[in-house]
Amino acid sequence: MAAQADRVGDTPDRAFDEQVTRGVSILRGDPKVAVRKLAGPMIVAMLLIAIYNLADAVWVSGIGSDALAGVGFVTPLFMILMGLSNGLGAGATSVVARCIGARDKEGADTAATHAILTAFLVSAVLMVIFVLYLRPIVVLLGAGPVTDISVEYGQIVFLGTIFFLVVQMAYAVLRAEGDTKRTMYAMAVSSVLNIILDPVLIYWAGLGVAGAAIATVISIASVLVVLAYWFLVRRDTFVTLKIRGFSPDVRIFRSILGVGIPASLEYLLLSVMSLSMNLILVTIAGTDAVAVYTSGWRIVMFAIVPLIGIATSVIAVSGAAYGAREFEKIRTVHRYSIRIGVAIGFVTGILTYLLSPQITALFTYSPESAHLSPAFILFFQTMCFFYPFIPLGMFSSSVFQGTGHGVTSLVISLLRALAFDIVFAFILGIVLGLGEFGVYSGIVVGNIIGGFIGYLWAGVFLDRLVRID
């Protein structure tokens, strides 16, 4: 298996056609159809995930603003965990999809097995770091009076690190073979279980924020059981995990990490941005501002779920087309996905602006958090301008990840998050004295500039690819 080559898996598997699933057929067919059909189940699944993330915040807000802020200081760290799992997953999706595009079944199987092993190794290291050193970390982040709440919540969540990483890697393998429906079913199990357990453990069992953390860990652990059954017992996926006779191959790890590490660093940049915004907001308006930003950001993540679903499908479809050397398909995927993404972003922005008072009510229904209403409305009505420009950078990064150019995607995100978002938030929020409104406006301006840079860069890259073909 030529794992280190641009085109992973140059030797076709003779039995490939006999084992092709419906998902693989879609993945290797019309790129527009593939984007739509693969994105649909992912959007549904991610909406369910976003709903249970939102449910956490809504139920915790009933305890009071201190509980919201305490969870808020753990949120950037949890974003690091999920970012790493999603980033490594992007690497796995890219490599496995390229093997499938090159008709290399054995290469896809081997890459998938290496991906799962990578998740186990990384999660073991992260769990020790986050659990043992959580208190000094949140103190450093400025948790202050809510430090104990942050530690109580965070230590439980991070004990489940292995579940989060392995599950996300298994999702990545399923996406790579075009099986997003099965991914949707697994995510649905996790979401529904979490939504049921939250009020039970937080209020009925009287566990408070610890109950929210326990519900999250139990829900994701249950998904791992389902995935293990599909891959190891039922064994009806296109990709097969090769546990017996497994022999680690450094070249395959390098191929996965070549995309996975830069993609993970992109998510780390989001965490850095979140941490930076927390520090800026604490300076401007105290921990209440952190509670508003971190809770409100859950709504933002909920609103961009359709875009994330499309982005994951773009990685898989681009990877398969790149493995098959059908470069024109990649350009079609890029342009088509951005057109529908921008349209979705405009609609989302309008709805967010109009419904901001109703959305705010989700977080301010209790007497303890009612005073946060004006700040929440300000956040939502400013961030609505954020949505239409997200597809430009997000889908361009997905194309680079799918084709194995993870470093380029990282550079684009680095420019956006550090050179634009944080700088503009600091200038508008603190230097110009615009306060919370300035911070949120800085995020919007930075995203617009970064998005256009990513779009133009991807356009030049794809033009060169097509000329080569």
Image (tube, rainbow, N blue to C red):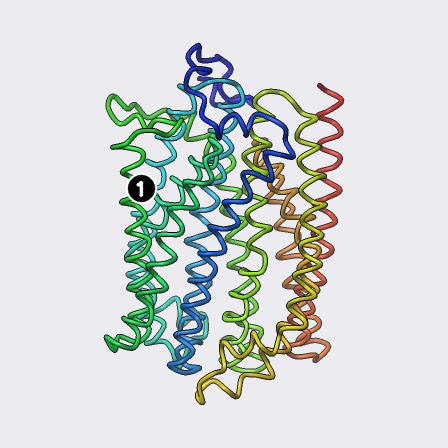
Q: Residue furthest top?
A: 14
Q: Which residue lies at the image location 76% right of the left edge and 29% below the top edge?
A: 463
Q: Is residue 46 above or below residue 382?
A: above
Q: Position of residue 200 (x, y in %)?
A: 28, 71
**Count of marks placed on residues:** 1
Locate residue 84 relative to residue 399 in the image: left or right: left
Q: Which residue lies at the image location 69% right of the left edge and 47% below the top edge?
A: 340
Q: Which residue lies at the image location 27% right of the left edge and 71% below the top edge?
A: 201
Q: Is residue 228 above or below residue 355?
A: above
Q: Quadrant of the N terminus?
A: top left
Q: Is residue 354 above or below residue 52?
A: below
Q: Say which amino acid is labelled 1.
A: Phe
- Residue 373 figure quarter: bottom right
Locate residue 96 relative to residue 399 in the image: left or right: left
Q: Position of residue 337 (x, y in %)?
A: 67, 42
Q: Which residue is mark 1?
A: 120
Q: Which residue lies at the image location 36% right of the left edge and 72% below the top edge?
A: 150
Q: Position of residue 168 (x, y in %)?
A: 40, 45
* Near-viewer residue (265 or 293): 293
